[in-house]
Image (cartoon, helix red, strand yellow):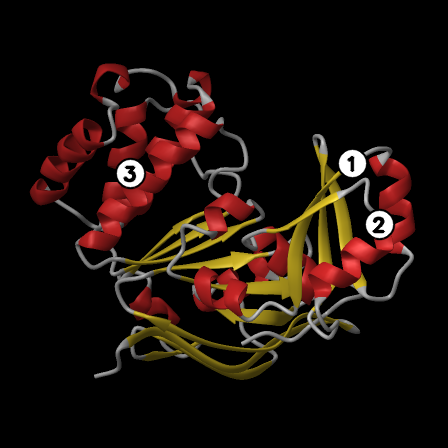
Amino acid sequence: MSDYAIQTEGMTKVFGNIAAVDNLSLRIPKGTIYGFLGPNGCGKSTSIRMLTGLLSPSHGEVTVLGESLPKHAESLRRRVGYMTQKLSLYDNLTVEENLHFVRRIYGLGKQGKVRVASLLDLYGLTECRHQMAGSMSGGQKQRLALAAATIHEPELLFLDEPTSAVDPENRRDFWERLFDLCSVGTTILVSTHYMDEAERCHGLAILERGQMRADGSPEELMSKMGAIVFEVEGPDLRAVKKHLTALPEVLSAAQLGVRLRVLVSHNVGHPNLWLSSCLGAKFRVDEVRPSLEDVFVTCTGRNAYALG
């Protein structure tokens, strides 16, 4: 039996002349949270739809929970959960009615009724169980959608940008619930464009234009990054930024309040001394810990360093 919940080899989806997903190969271990990180249009949602069996790949091999797709898509549907980007809830049904509707879809009888009551309590929805879903706040809808996606206790849960419409506090609480699910053995694949969420994942793939630019744990990706990160303090940072970004050795420069965050290519010898010589004595230059956003900058766009 494989230790991987998801395995793909060269998974590709072509629409007309456009490869929405291009030769994607994945190994996602069971019982982990794995992330797809990238901007809109990078192939996150299309990949998830292929992994859930909703789309057939144009090329490549896809194995989910030991079964090949799309051949076994129907039998896999009872083993996976899928929370879509737009939260598939019925606004004209109450919270409780939404859950009972999903329960019936999965053919859950008396045991399912007990499960609904348990989920209402688990996700803090008991007091609003008679409220129409359409009148709920973004955070409440998110909790209801997660309850609906897990009502049949799936082995594998897909979440497509689940926190795009909620505030930071609800996002943090939502991720705590994901770790609760993971702790009891559920494998989770989540797509996001939030860097802080991606850093919470055990592993992740950075996607751009349908291609994987990097793959690994956040710590591994930061350690293999093709740049050294510095923060610069001094006068007239806007002019300094313009000067530095014109240099081929500088991959990126972005202002953060009174500091400038500068990524210098790892090909530069003694990068601290080099950057200090470029700026002069009026500036303070400190090497700092990389972030996942720094990794994203170095392996996408014009920089496109290959990591991993």
Q: How far across and down, in percent of the image, does residue 192 sit? A: 53, 49
Mark 1 falls on what kind of element? loop
Q: Amino acid at mark 1?
A: Gly
For marks 3 and 2 on the same chain, the one whose residue lies earlier in the sequence: 3
Between 4 and 255, the one lying in front of the other is 255
> Image height check: is 4 above or below 241?
below
Q: Amino acid at mark 3?
A: Ala
Residue at position x 64%, y 75% from top? 306
Q: CA distance from mark 2 to mark 1?
A: 9 Å
Q: Quadrant of residue 170?
A: top left
Q: Is residue 27 left or right of residue 41?
A: left
Foreground mark, 1 or 3? 1
In the rendered picture of this protein, how many numbered marks are placed on residues? 3
For marks 1 and 3 on the same chain, the one whose residue lies earlier in the sequence: 3
Q: What mark, if any, has residue 147 been given in the picture?
A: 3
Q: CA distance from mark 3 to mark 2?
A: 54 Å
For marks 2 and 1 on the same chain, the one whose residue lies earlier in the sequence: 1
The crowding category of the residue bearing disc 2, from other C-alpha atoms within 10 Å (few below 14, some 14 to 19, many at least 20), is some
Q: Are marks 2 and 1 in contact (CB under 8 Å)?
A: yes
> In this rendering, does residue 22 appear at all?
yes
Quadrant in which the N terminus is drawn? bottom left
Mark 2 falls on what kind of element? helix
Look at mark 2 in the image and give the residue it sits on.
Answer: 279
Q: How far across and down, in percent of the image, does residue 95 sit? A: 31, 25
Residue at position x 34%, y 32% from top? 173
Between 299 and 185, the one lying in front of the other is 299
